[in-house]
Image (tube, helix red, strand yellow):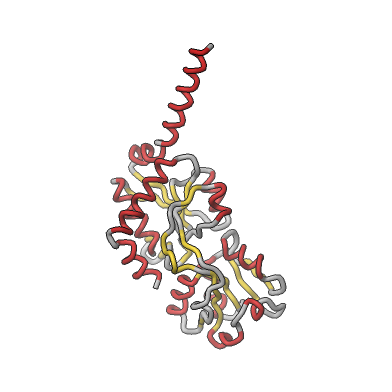
Amino acid sequence: MRTLKIFLICAIVFICNAVEAGHLEEIAERGTIRIGTTGDYRPMSYFNEKTGEYEGIDAELSKIIADSLGVEIEYVPTTWKTLTADTLAGKFDIALCGISRNYARAKTMAMSDGYGVGYFGKTILCRKKDAKKFRTLADIDKPSVRVMINPGGTNEIFAKTNLKRAQLIVYNENAEIPNQISIGNADIMITETVEALRYIALDKNLAAPLIDKPFTTHSCGILMQKGDQEFLNYINFVLAEIRDDGTLAKLEQKYLR
Protein backbone atom coordinates (compact mmCIF):
# COMPACT_ATOMS: atom_id res chain seq x y z
CA MET A 1 0.00 0.00 0.00
CA ARG A 2 2.84 2.38 0.91
CA THR A 3 4.55 1.67 -2.43
CA LEU A 4 1.29 2.44 -4.23
CA LYS A 5 0.93 5.75 -2.38
CA ILE A 6 4.49 6.76 -3.27
CA PHE A 7 3.83 5.85 -6.91
CA LEU A 8 0.65 7.93 -6.97
CA ILE A 9 2.40 10.94 -5.41
CA CYS A 10 5.22 10.74 -7.94
CA ALA A 11 2.69 10.44 -10.77
CA ILE A 12 0.82 13.54 -9.56
CA VAL A 13 4.06 15.53 -9.28
CA PHE A 14 5.08 14.43 -12.78
CA ILE A 15 1.70 15.43 -14.22
CA CYS A 16 1.78 18.83 -12.48
CA ASN A 17 5.28 19.52 -13.79
CA ALA A 18 4.20 18.53 -17.28
CA VAL A 19 1.25 20.92 -17.12
CA GLU A 20 3.45 23.74 -15.86
CA ALA A 21 5.85 23.35 -18.75
CA GLY A 22 3.01 22.93 -21.23
CA HIS A 23 2.65 26.34 -22.81
CA LEU A 24 6.31 26.98 -23.56
CA GLU A 25 6.71 23.49 -25.03
CA GLU A 26 3.49 23.75 -27.05
CA ILE A 27 4.43 27.16 -28.43
CA ALA A 28 7.87 25.90 -29.48
CA GLU A 29 6.39 22.83 -31.19
CA ARG A 30 3.64 24.85 -32.86
CA GLY A 31 6.01 27.55 -34.05
CA THR A 32 3.51 30.28 -33.18
CA ILE A 33 2.26 32.05 -30.10
CA ARG A 34 -1.51 32.61 -30.15
CA ILE A 35 -2.30 36.13 -28.97
CA GLY A 36 -5.84 37.15 -28.15
CA THR A 37 -6.67 40.77 -28.88
CA THR A 38 -9.72 42.93 -29.43
CA GLY A 39 -8.00 45.16 -31.99
CA ASP A 40 -10.28 48.07 -31.11
CA TYR A 41 -8.28 50.05 -28.58
CA ARG A 42 -5.97 52.82 -29.69
CA PRO A 43 -3.10 53.13 -28.79
CA MET A 44 -2.85 49.62 -27.30
CA SER A 45 -4.03 47.16 -29.95
CA TYR A 46 -5.80 48.44 -33.04
CA PHE A 47 -6.45 46.52 -36.25
CA ASN A 48 -5.79 48.76 -39.23
CA GLU A 49 -8.12 47.60 -41.98
CA LYS A 50 -6.13 49.48 -44.63
CA THR A 51 -2.86 47.67 -43.87
CA GLY A 52 -4.30 44.46 -42.44
CA GLU A 53 -1.94 44.82 -39.48
CA TYR A 54 -2.29 45.30 -35.74
CA GLU A 55 -0.85 48.53 -34.38
CA GLY A 56 -0.02 49.90 -30.94
CA ILE A 57 2.16 49.20 -27.94
CA ASP A 58 0.63 45.75 -27.43
CA ALA A 59 1.38 44.82 -31.02
CA GLU A 60 5.02 45.73 -30.40
CA LEU A 61 5.09 43.84 -27.09
CA SER A 62 3.58 40.83 -28.86
CA LYS A 63 6.41 40.88 -31.40
CA ILE A 64 9.04 41.17 -28.68
CA ILE A 65 7.59 38.14 -26.87
CA ALA A 66 7.32 36.13 -30.08
CA ASP A 67 10.87 37.01 -31.13
CA SER A 68 12.20 36.02 -27.71
CA LEU A 69 10.64 32.58 -28.21
CA GLY A 70 11.75 32.31 -31.83
CA VAL A 71 8.18 31.89 -33.10
CA GLU A 72 5.62 33.76 -35.20
CA ILE A 73 2.48 35.55 -33.98
CA GLU A 74 -0.94 34.03 -34.58
CA TYR A 75 -3.55 36.64 -33.65
CA VAL A 76 -6.85 35.35 -32.29
CA PRO A 77 -9.63 37.97 -32.35
CA THR A 78 -11.67 38.33 -29.15
CA THR A 79 -14.04 40.93 -27.70
CA TRP A 80 -14.25 42.65 -24.34
CA LYS A 81 -17.48 40.78 -23.69
CA THR A 82 -15.91 37.37 -24.36
CA LEU A 83 -12.33 38.04 -23.21
CA THR A 84 -12.65 36.20 -19.90
CA ALA A 85 -14.48 33.21 -21.37
CA ASP A 86 -12.03 32.95 -24.27
CA THR A 87 -9.06 33.11 -21.89
CA LEU A 88 -10.48 30.44 -19.60
CA ALA A 89 -11.29 28.26 -22.63
CA GLY A 90 -7.67 28.40 -23.79
CA LYS A 91 -8.45 29.94 -27.17
CA PHE A 92 -5.07 31.71 -27.05
CA ASP A 93 -1.84 31.55 -25.06
CA ILE A 94 -1.91 35.16 -23.87
CA ALA A 95 -4.07 38.23 -24.39
CA LEU A 96 -2.78 41.76 -24.98
CA CYS A 97 -5.12 44.65 -25.71
CA GLY A 98 -4.76 47.20 -22.92
CA ILE A 99 -6.17 44.85 -20.27
CA SER A 100 -6.56 46.49 -16.86
CA ARG A 101 -5.03 44.67 -13.92
CA ASN A 102 -7.70 44.20 -11.28
CA TYR A 103 -8.75 41.83 -8.50
CA ALA A 104 -11.67 40.36 -10.42
CA ARG A 105 -9.42 39.15 -13.25
CA ALA A 106 -6.68 37.98 -10.89
CA LYS A 107 -9.14 35.74 -9.03
CA THR A 108 -9.84 33.56 -12.05
CA MET A 109 -6.93 34.16 -14.43
CA ALA A 110 -3.22 34.92 -14.29
CA MET A 111 -1.93 38.42 -15.03
CA SER A 112 1.61 39.52 -15.68
CA ASP A 113 3.42 42.30 -13.91
CA GLY A 114 2.06 45.70 -14.85
CA TYR A 115 3.20 47.99 -17.63
CA GLY A 116 2.10 51.50 -18.51
CA VAL A 117 2.24 52.31 -14.80
CA GLY A 118 1.17 55.91 -14.21
CA TYR A 119 -0.43 56.33 -17.65
CA PHE A 120 -3.86 54.75 -17.21
CA GLY A 121 -7.02 55.99 -15.55
CA LYS A 122 -10.73 56.27 -16.28
CA THR A 123 -11.76 59.58 -17.83
CA ILE A 124 -14.28 60.94 -20.33
CA LEU A 125 -14.43 61.91 -23.95
CA CYS A 126 -17.00 64.52 -25.02
CA ARG A 127 -17.59 67.12 -27.72
CA LYS A 128 -15.33 70.13 -27.39
CA LYS A 129 -18.26 72.54 -27.23
CA ASP A 130 -19.58 70.67 -24.15
CA ALA A 131 -16.27 70.37 -22.31
CA LYS A 132 -17.06 73.01 -19.69
CA LYS A 133 -20.26 71.19 -18.72
CA PHE A 134 -18.46 68.12 -17.39
CA ARG A 135 -16.10 68.69 -14.47
CA THR A 136 -17.21 65.98 -12.04
CA LEU A 137 -19.04 62.65 -12.01
CA ALA A 138 -22.06 64.53 -10.68
CA ASP A 139 -22.09 66.65 -13.84
CA ILE A 140 -22.20 63.47 -15.90
CA ASP A 141 -24.67 61.53 -13.77
CA LYS A 142 -27.80 63.32 -14.91
CA PRO A 143 -30.85 61.95 -16.75
CA SER A 144 -30.18 64.25 -19.69
CA VAL A 145 -26.65 62.93 -20.28
CA ARG A 146 -26.15 60.02 -22.70
CA VAL A 147 -23.12 57.90 -21.82
CA MET A 148 -21.91 55.37 -24.40
CA ILE A 149 -19.93 52.31 -23.31
CA ASN A 150 -18.63 49.13 -24.90
CA PRO A 151 -19.87 45.87 -23.30
CA GLY A 152 -17.78 43.53 -21.20
CA GLY A 153 -14.86 45.70 -20.16
CA THR A 154 -13.93 47.84 -17.20
CA ASN A 155 -15.46 50.93 -18.85
CA GLU A 156 -18.87 49.31 -18.57
CA ILE A 157 -18.22 48.28 -14.97
CA PHE A 158 -17.10 51.79 -14.04
CA ALA A 159 -20.14 53.39 -15.68
CA LYS A 160 -22.66 51.04 -14.08
CA THR A 161 -21.01 51.41 -10.68
CA ASN A 162 -20.76 55.19 -10.67
CA LEU A 163 -23.54 56.47 -12.92
CA LYS A 164 -27.02 55.76 -11.60
CA ARG A 165 -29.05 58.50 -13.29
CA ALA A 166 -27.37 59.04 -16.66
CA GLN A 167 -28.59 57.25 -19.78
CA LEU A 168 -26.21 54.33 -20.45
CA ILE A 169 -26.00 53.29 -24.10
CA VAL A 170 -24.19 50.02 -24.85
CA TYR A 171 -22.43 50.10 -28.23
CA ASN A 172 -20.65 46.96 -29.42
CA GLU A 173 -17.90 48.53 -31.52
CA ASN A 174 -15.52 50.26 -29.09
CA ALA A 175 -13.39 51.85 -31.82
CA GLU A 176 -16.46 53.59 -33.26
CA ILE A 177 -17.68 55.18 -30.02
CA PRO A 178 -15.53 58.34 -30.29
CA ASN A 179 -17.12 59.12 -33.64
CA GLN A 180 -20.56 58.45 -32.17
CA ILE A 181 -19.79 61.12 -29.58
CA SER A 182 -18.42 63.48 -32.22
CA ILE A 183 -21.54 63.32 -34.41
CA GLY A 184 -23.89 63.69 -31.46
CA ASN A 185 -25.34 60.21 -30.97
CA ALA A 186 -24.17 60.31 -27.34
CA ASP A 187 -22.61 62.90 -25.05
CA ILE A 188 -19.94 61.04 -23.10
CA MET A 189 -17.62 58.09 -23.63
CA ILE A 190 -16.12 56.47 -20.55
CA THR A 191 -12.59 55.61 -21.60
CA GLU A 192 -8.94 55.53 -20.57
CA THR A 193 -6.64 58.53 -20.51
CA VAL A 194 -4.36 57.04 -23.18
CA GLU A 195 -7.29 56.34 -25.51
CA ALA A 196 -8.74 59.81 -24.93
CA LEU A 197 -5.41 61.41 -25.83
CA ARG A 198 -5.32 59.54 -29.12
CA TYR A 199 -8.85 60.45 -30.14
CA ILE A 200 -8.67 64.15 -29.32
CA ALA A 201 -5.60 64.23 -31.57
CA LEU A 202 -7.53 62.51 -34.37
CA ASP A 203 -10.78 64.48 -34.09
CA LYS A 204 -10.74 68.22 -33.40
CA ASN A 205 -14.41 68.05 -32.45
CA LEU A 206 -13.58 65.98 -29.34
CA ALA A 207 -12.24 66.94 -25.92
CA ALA A 208 -11.11 65.21 -22.73
CA PRO A 209 -11.57 67.90 -20.07
CA LEU A 210 -10.72 65.65 -17.11
CA ILE A 211 -7.71 63.89 -18.58
CA ASP A 212 -5.32 65.36 -15.98
CA LYS A 213 -7.59 64.24 -13.12
CA PRO A 214 -8.68 60.67 -13.92
CA PHE A 215 -11.30 59.03 -11.73
CA THR A 216 -9.10 55.94 -11.22
CA THR A 217 -5.51 54.84 -11.84
CA HIS A 218 -4.21 51.40 -12.79
CA SER A 219 -1.74 49.56 -15.02
CA CYS A 220 -2.17 46.99 -17.79
CA GLY A 221 -1.14 43.37 -17.78
CA ILE A 222 -0.82 40.37 -20.06
CA LEU A 223 -3.65 37.91 -19.42
CA MET A 224 -3.53 34.10 -19.47
CA GLN A 225 -4.97 30.98 -17.90
CA LYS A 226 -3.96 30.05 -14.36
CA GLY A 227 -1.89 26.95 -13.71
CA ASP A 228 1.29 27.50 -15.73
CA GLN A 229 3.67 29.34 -13.41
CA GLU A 230 6.67 28.68 -15.65
CA PHE A 231 4.96 30.43 -18.56
CA LEU A 232 3.88 33.36 -16.38
CA ASN A 233 7.44 33.64 -15.06
CA TYR A 234 8.74 33.76 -18.61
CA ILE A 235 6.35 36.54 -19.64
CA ASN A 236 7.32 38.52 -16.54
CA PHE A 237 11.00 37.91 -17.36
CA VAL A 238 10.53 39.42 -20.83
CA LEU A 239 8.81 42.46 -19.32
CA ALA A 240 11.60 42.83 -16.75
CA GLU A 241 14.28 42.65 -19.43
CA ILE A 242 12.72 45.33 -21.63
CA ARG A 243 12.06 47.46 -18.57
CA ASP A 244 15.72 47.21 -17.54
CA ASP A 245 17.16 47.96 -20.99
CA GLY A 246 14.87 50.97 -21.57
CA THR A 247 12.80 49.45 -24.39
CA LEU A 248 9.56 49.55 -22.41
CA ALA A 249 10.05 53.20 -21.46
CA LYS A 250 10.59 54.08 -25.13
CA LEU A 251 7.42 52.25 -26.15
CA GLU A 252 5.42 53.93 -23.40
CA GLN A 253 6.77 57.31 -24.49
CA LYS A 254 5.87 56.54 -28.13
CA TYR A 255 2.33 55.29 -27.56
CA LEU A 256 1.04 56.43 -24.19
CA ARG A 257 2.00 60.09 -23.92
Classify the position of the N terminus by image quarter. top right
Taking the spot 72% from the left edge, 77% from the top edge, the residue there is: 143
Residue 22 position in % (x across, y down): 41, 36
Residue 67 position in % (x across, y down): 29, 50
Residue 239 position in % (x across, y down): 36, 54
Taking the spot 53% from the left edge, 79% from the top edge, the residue there is: 210
Taking the spot 51% from the left edge, 82% from the top edge, the residue there is: 207
Q: Nearer the viewer, residue 240 or 196?
A: 240
Q: Nearer the viewer, residue 210 or 244?
A: 244
Left or right placement of residue 70 versus residue 214 in this view: left
Q: Examine the rendered structure and indicate whether residue 178 appears above or below residue 223.
A: below
Name the quadrant containing residue 18: top left
Whether residue 26 appears in this view of the structure is yes
Extreme residue in the front direction: 2
Taking the spot 48% from the left edge, 72% from the top edge, the residue there is: 193
Total labels drawn: 0
Classify the position of the C terminus by image quarter. bottom left
Whether residue 47 appears in this view of the structure is no
Residue 242 position in % (x across, y down): 31, 57
